[in-house]
Amino acid sequence: RERSTPDRMQQQQQQQQQQQASTATFAAMAASPYETAETYEIDLARLLHPAGHCVIDLDNLESDKPLANMIGYVAAVDSEVRFVLRSVKVQSASGASLALVTNYPEPQESQPSQRDAAGSPMPTRPDFRRLADSRSPCEDAALCGAGFCAAMRLTAPGFFEFRLVRVGGCTIGAGVLGRGFLYVEDDRLSVTVSTSPTPVSPTRRRTARSPSWPHLLQSAQQQQMSQVQQPRTQQQTPLAGASVQTLLTKCMGPIAEWGSHFETSRRCGYTAVHLTPVQPPAWSGSCYSIIDQLDVNPRLFSPDDHCDTPQQRINKLKIAIRSAKAKYGLMMITDVLLSHTATDTVWLPEHPDAAYDLKTSPHLKVAFVLDEALHRFGEAFADGAYGPTQLKSRSDVDRLVAEFSKEVLPKLRLWEFYVVNVNTELARLEEALRHDGVTTSSCAVVEGDQTPQPATPAQAAERLRAAMTRAPGGRFPFSVTDSIAAIRVCVGDPNKFVELLDLVNLPLYREYDTDVACILRSLTNYLCYIHVDPHGPKRQSIRPLLPRYFTVLAPKRTPEIDLLGTLESVVAVAHHGWVMDGHPFTDFAGPNSKAYLRREVIVWEDTVKLRYGTRFEDSPWLWQHMAKYMQLQAHIFDGFRIDNCHSVPLPVLQYLISEARLANRDLVVLAELFSSSFEAFQSYTSSCGIHAILKEAINATSPAGLSHILFESGGPLFDPIGEPEVLWGPQPAVPYPVKSWIFDVTHDNEPLFRTRPEVDALPLAASVAMCSAVTGSVRGFDELLPHKVDVVLENRKYPIYRWDKAEVEHTLPGIMAVKAHLNALHRELAVNGYNEVYAESTGPLVNMARHNPVLLQTIHMVTHPAYYGSAPPAELPPVKVTGEVFEIRFAGTLVGVPPPWTATQVERAQRQVGGLLEGRRAQLQFDLAPTFDQNPYVTVELDRDSGTSTLRFQQFPPGSIVCFASRLPQGTQAAMHSLNALLEACDGTGARPWDLFDGVDLLAMNILMYRSDEEEHAETGHGAYDVPGLGKLPYCGLQGWETIIREVTHRHPIDMGHPLLNHLRGGDWAIDYITNRMKQCQQLDRIRQWITRAGDCIKALPRYLVPKFFFVVISSLHRACVEWSLSQMSSYVQNADTFAQRLALTSLQVCGSLKSSPLVSPDVLSPPNCPDNVTLAAGLPHFCHGYMRSWGRDTFISLKGLLLITGRFKEAHDILCGFACSLRHGLIPNLLDGGRNPRFNARDAAWWFLNALLEYCLMAPCGTAIMEEKVHRIFPSEACPSQVSSMADVVQEILTSHANGIHFREWNAGPKIDDKMQDAGFNVDVTLDQHTGFIFGGNQNNCGTWMDKMGESKQAGNYGTPATPRDGAAIEIVALSYKVLTQLAELHKHGSFPYSSVPLHAGDSLSYADWASRIETNFHRHFFVPLNPAEDTKYDIEPSVVNVRGIYKDTYGGSLPFANYQLRPNCCVAFSLAPALFAKHPKELATALRTVEERLAGPLGMCTLNKEDWAYRGIYNSDDSTEYNTAKGFSYHQGPEWVWIFGYFLQAVVVSRGALFGGSTGKTRHHVHSLLGPHIHHLVHSPWESLPELTNADGAVCPGSCPCQAWSVACIQEALYMLQQCSV
């Protein structure tokens, strides 16, 4: 959506006024009748969501830009027309998987080729159940349109055809736009589309929400219309402006007379007509029961038409419809009946399996037996066999039902359809015992069966039940088929066997009793409603007593059927109907439903329910027959109303609609879909391309109920007034819109007078006309017919009006004249962009509003509905409107209507031959454009101070309406113009695009954009903003607001009652908070002044617009900050995909300057000697301030990914120098604490520091110069007594200390620094094994690597015990030392580092190159665990503790031998950082990596321990318990999945691509991207805009984890950077 700002208004208004049909048309390239073809490419490596969907934005097809990368599933030419190309999902190294809109999936090899009657091959149909089940909820958001959701595995390069589909939204005419080709090669997707020579409007993007109707309306616009019907605009109509009138074909007369009725519809302002089925009706005469889907009702033709055959009738109908469309400009919609057919259907005797018959649906046999018995009982009752034959009271009904229960039901022995036949099964058991020669006493154990005997009879019965099979449908369906198991369970004792069978039968008999109770209750309820209830029909006749649930096709005489027999010769089919509150996904005639047995189906006795199954193979003839029916209707008509859509299985509906769209690509699909489940609506509409779902406004019983129905039909699902907008960036993946086809009254509804006074016809019609949806009405409602037109019994014809006579307008019955104006208004609002909707009730009044967000004008309709039992108040409440009411469009009152007909009059008229359905002349007062001063309806008062208009109603009784227009006050216009000028300053496109950011650096951006609540409180004493009802924002800066803005605007539908929106409407506190907190940073003064001025403009707006434009301002500034920040980073970041850029922004989140948490405190070093105060927070919000902010290990693992790759070399330099100041004992502190109380308990921190320092030397401009930097030392040492040294000296001191051994006791050892560690744990020891070159260290009482969890639970007994001591030589430290040594040797060779060796205590020296060589020589032998135990002698292996083979040990020489061999992910660090150690062993490397991926890789992180390990515990929490392995978070590194190490795993994949993928960069990239999908998804949806510290097992959220962790982001970024570097 485009920004709604005043400077754009004029241009957008012109676009609205010039709106034309702008739909692209593509066709198959193979046909090549087109002039041009263009090819565009998508780089799969650059997808924002490589594991999800990429969207092709057709706006870009006319430009040179690459196709858009978005998170959504649809892209838009404008805000409503959605074009779907279900796109790329990178799933594995074998290639991409495309979800395409195709006609059919590729045929399955297991499916035999089918042939038609002539022997010709038939197209293979897909397994629709499989397709439906395989789609995710996200995929359901996109439309399959012209085909099905077919997932195709692209395992090799090649061309793949696709169809481009225009989908519903507000579009009339969804269908195939054409075809093109995809070409997949390596990791690029080329899209080639052919362009049509048909001219396309250059105005591709329009503000109007609705695309145009097809050409069908153009001819009508060229004709002269009367003043009554003349619309206010001559433009084409979008779907939201369509109005449809239902016409019963049986009441229209011969086809030759239809034109007169179409003219009436057109004159009344309707833009489409809905015709009931044109097929031959059943014996009942119902429009909705047809006997032949491939024929046309012969009664619609006169003898002169010479239509004697079905084909002649079809051709005649085609000509008539085509002619009518051209002449009257109406869209022609017809019903299609997919769920049922007539009981006397011509093909039913030949194809009873197309229905639910007793052979294909044997589970219905019990229901059939009951139904036939009820029929016979009813006949006997009517004949007087059971006493009095009258049903006048509830007691009569109870007596009759009791008689059936007592005399008839037991004789049917229905329980036999439930239970096991005990006698039969006992005889089988005894036969088995005799046959096998097994005696009762010797059957304690069956040979070979080690299953323990059940402990209780209930368990034994359950075991016996498991030995049975069920044959559904017949009596005694259960039988014991596993005789051995039966003998075993009863120990061969027949008596015990009978007892167990009784136990098995007990719940089955209870089930029978429950069903019988339901049956009797249903019978009672039905008979009471039909004969007794005052609101029922109170039928006098008792024949038939009950409806039949089945039609018997054979035998002809049903009394001959033996209800106690097998029913094998009976051909009976189930009637169709509906179940109260039934779910569309439930087949109420299927084997899992008892609706027919329990008599819960309200049946239509003239119809038969069709049985499709869920696959083509389930009922091939029916699928083919109904596909022909759909295609035939699609050739004739423009659209369908799918009758009883909820009874059609979803896969069937997808298939049949697709078949219809092959015949008519612009087919409109409207549906009657009744369900209480929004998910059902969503699933049906999205997967089938349904444009709108039928709803009925007449069902409202109060003004509040009516306003709710109307608002729901066109409001919150689309565009409520003041709705915030998504201005830019990835558009939200909104569900396919469940739009409404809202009727005032349908042909199924009772007449208006049965529910409310008839004067309500005018308010009801006016309210519906204001909906932003398709509207509808039935012929007769506008004419105020005095009765309902019965679709079964009615035979009279509609009257024909002489529209060529001028006086006809003055003689029209009912509200026909007014309806023309209402329909014209409905159309105008949609065409002219009044798309934001609001509806409310004020006392007895209903106020509907349609707002134009560009013109800032609103059209209102206030109605006074009439309801029985509600007297109008003495004084109507006023209605207040924001803005100035400047026009009254029209007003009117339906004063009175002649009384409706009695039932006797209706019955007499229905029997009349040649009668007409004539309406009633009403007392109607209607004024067009009444003046403010001279109208009797309403007075308007304007309060110019508040800009509010108040409407007070005078002569406005029930049955009244008034339509008026309002606009915003002039002061609001000025504020919005000023706001627009301010917004231009931060869009980055002016002459000085970043003028707003002069003097700002990225550290200031940390304050402006982020800062957690804890950081802010530590710095200023204030915290994050607390929104009432929502809580604190995740960040204090703009990102905190943007996170909630995104949550609001990306939700569908938008919650206009969201706490943030309510808060913003209530006051200006939020904008003041944002402005005031910027005062803490002088660099932000210019931005603070900008947002202050913008805030003043927002404060001048009406309160209902404040949230919308607050969102505009904050999102605009946030976007500008993001773009400017990225422009200050490295070229890699600027050219990277959106995912990598969002990762780069994390450096702003965690890198900042906090006075409360300095890098080096001025208390320990005077300011001139301190580096600049910049630090990396290890994680937010737990590790971000005080002594917990700066961790040595975390900082230097994160440094490359967050600062070096992003080009933030100054910050990296300062951090390196700051930590170097704190060197002590040859170690870098684990916790820095500004140098005040550092802890030197990390054996690996110094190596990570050296690694980061060397990366800085390689990546920063003149990076090696840092080696000469002066470092002011906090702690003196023998190597540096002056406390000033160079960085090179610091490096040498670290290496020398490690080479000669480090042995000390931590300073202040004891509870002051760690109240949990045992005393021996404070002893720090690090030694070098000069033979292997490995660094050893630690003991069982401390944990000096990153797996540093110390036990805390006294209750569980792990207090003071490290969970993972990892003493010995840790694999990552060995690899780090190797990398550092080799790189330092290389730097020395090039003169960039002064040292080449370290001195040893014995007076010798050890060169870096020699040290590294010793590591390389010994590494594989000491760390690898071979797959084949026979090779153990080649390695340093303890076979007794080996758990997993084909891996590298986690540690070597540790005090716990089994721990050395535990499979952990630390080897990934070694694979990534020191690939030379594995260069000679590629097979072993590939094996180890695959094992790590298979056993340790989770969705986001790496399991810290193999799941098959005895110590594995995948859940981390801080709860105390008696469980040793988990209490107080003891499992921190014993299974939970850490994200940072996943990054090193990905780096290892990239580095090892030669061993894994034969060196293929493309395959490597695909594999890495396929693994990153969950990370992208998490980043996109995280309120912290980051990746977490860890997750619990299988990616489950870990509540104790930091939601933003520095090293998690950094290591993933490193992997992406490494992937990009290997591609250069």
Image (cartoon, rainbow, N blue to C red):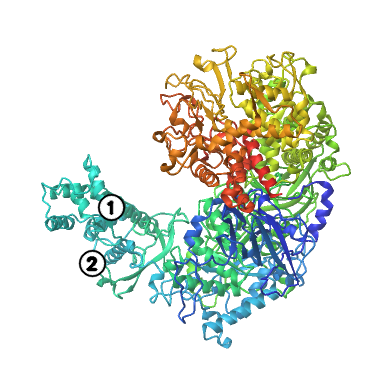
Image marks 2 and 1: residues in contact by CB distance under 8 Å = no
Circle 1 sits on which residue? 512
In terms of depth relative to the viewer, which is nearer, 564 or 768? 564
| Residue 667 vertical position relative to residue 841 in the rendered view, above or below | below
In terms of depth relative to the viewer, which is nearer, 1250 or 1379? 1379
The image shows a total of numbered marks equal to 2
Residue 1437 in the image: x percent, y percent? Answer: 44, 35
Identify the image quadrant of residue 642. Answer: bottom right
Amino acid type for the residue under numbered disc 1: Tyr
- Left/right placement of residue 753 relative to residue 927 reads left
Residue 1019 in the image: x percent, y percent? Answer: 71, 21
Amino acid type for the residue under numbered disc 2: Gly
- Left/right placement of residue 407 relative to residue 104 reads left
Upstream in the sequence, badge 2 or badge 1?
1
Identify the image quadrant of residue 1295. Answer: top right
Residue 915 in the image: x percent, y percent? Answer: 55, 75
| Residue 688 vertical position relative to residue 1016 in the rendered view, above or below | below
Q: Which mark is residue 565?
A: 2
| Residue 805 vertical position relative to residue 1573 in the rendered view, above or below | below
Q: Secondary structure at mark 1?
A: helix
Q: CA distance from mark 2 to mark 1?
A: 19 Å
